[in-house]
Amino acid sequence: MDRPRRSTRPPARLTETPAPAPTVSTRPKRKTTQDVVIDPAEQLHTLLTNPKSALTSLDISDLINAMSWNMLSAESQTSLKALLPATAFLSYRATISSDHPSAVANDSMAVDELPVHESVVDTAVFTDPHFLAAARTLQDHIYSGWMSNAHTQKLLKYEEGLRNGTLAVAWKDDVWERNNGGSRRVVQAHDNGVVPGAARAGDAAEVKLVTLAQEGVLQVGDIIVLKRNFSALDILVEKDAIIQSIHPKTHALSVLFEPGTSAHLPAPLLSPNPSPPIGHTQETVITSPTQLETVLLDNDGRVERKKRPNGNAWKCMTVWRWRGTAPWQNVGDGRWGRENHGTLFYLRGTYHHER
C-alpha cells in the first residue's frame, strides 16, 4: 500500500498589511503637580485653619527652631521680632522695682534696651518649655477646628449676641451644677469629722431661700439689695427690699420696696422699730431670689422681660444687716448703718458647709 504523498504545492504568501496610522487623542492632558500654581497666601491660610492641616501631625520643633530662624531673610526676622516678648532677646535684663528691698543694694546703672529691630533673638527661646507649650496649643486649636472659618463665624455671632443682649454667658457655678449635680456620691468624712468641701459644692443649690429664713440666716429687718447691670442697654438697676416679716409655718418672706426706679426705702421703715408702711410703698411675698428679682425688675420698668439675659439671682442680691448693737444712723447710703453681709449665694454656701 502506497503511503500518501506530501503536497508539494507552495504555501500561500502572507501579504504585508500596512501599519495603522497613529491616532491623535482629543482628551485634555492631565495637569501634574508641577503645573498647578498654588497661591502662597491661600496655602498658609489652609495650614493655619484646616483641621486636616499638616501642621497638626508634625513635631513643631522640626519646623520652628534656631536653624529655620537663621534661614529667614532679615525682613522676615524683623516682622517676627515684633511678635516675641522682651525676654526672647539677648539684650533683655531683668529689673527690680525701686520699692523692692533687693533694689537698695543694686547700684548698677540702668541700661537702655535696644529697639526690637536691632535686638538679637536668643535662639534658646525655641526650646523653652513655655514656647513649645504655646505652639502645641496652637496645633490643638487647629486640629479641633477652632481656627476654621465656620468656628470664627460662630464666635462672631456669639459675641454680637452678647453685645445686643440676645445671649448671655452662663454662670460657671450653674454649669458645674448642671454637669455634676446628677452624679453626686456619698463621701466619707475624714478622721477629724470634716467632709471635703469640693464633694458637696453642687449640693448647696438644694438649699432654698425659705430654709435660710427658717434657720435664721435671713432675719426680719434685713435689707435685700438687688444690683444688676444690663450692659447692652447701659442700664443699672439697684433696688432695696426690706424683710418685714417671715411666715411662721411656710417661712415665706414678706418684703417692702419702693415703686418705680426709687432705690432706697423711707427712713421710718429702716429703724429698729419701723412704722407701718405708708404712701406708695409696695409689699410682696416671695419664696425665692428669682421671684424677688422678677418683681423688682417689673416694678422698675426700664428693662422688659424679653430683654433680660439669663442670670443668677443668688449672685445679684446682697444682704445688709446691723452688726451687733450698731447704732441706727444715717451714713448716706440709704441703709442707715447696716453693713454688707455678702450675697445670697455666699450665705447659702456658708450655711450649707457649716451645718
Image (tube, rainbow, N blue to C red):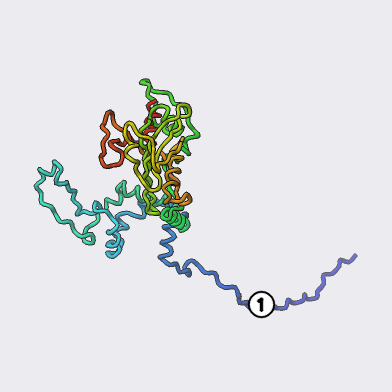
User: Residue 282 location, x and y as percent?
Assistant: 42, 41
User: Residue 199 location, x and y as percent?
Assistant: 42, 30
Query: Image point 48% across, 35% down: which residue?
Result: 181
**Along the viewing direction, whichever of 61 and 135 lies nearer the viewer:** 135
Tell me the quarter of the image containing the N terminus: bottom right
Q: Using the rendered image of the protein, determine whether residue 140 is visible from the camera's viewpoint.
A: yes
Q: Is residue 330 left or right of residue 182?
A: left
Image quadrant of residue 63?
Answer: bottom left
Query: Image point 43% across, 58% down: which residue?
Result: 47
Could you tell me the amino acid type at mark 1? Pro
Q: Which residue is mark 1?
A: 20
User: Disc count in the image?
Assistant: 1
Tell me the quarter of the image containing the C terminus: top left
Query: Image point 77% across, 75% down: which residue?
Result: 11
**Along the viewing direction, whichever of 201 and 121 lies nearer the viewer:** 201
141 is higher (above) or lower (below) than 291 = below
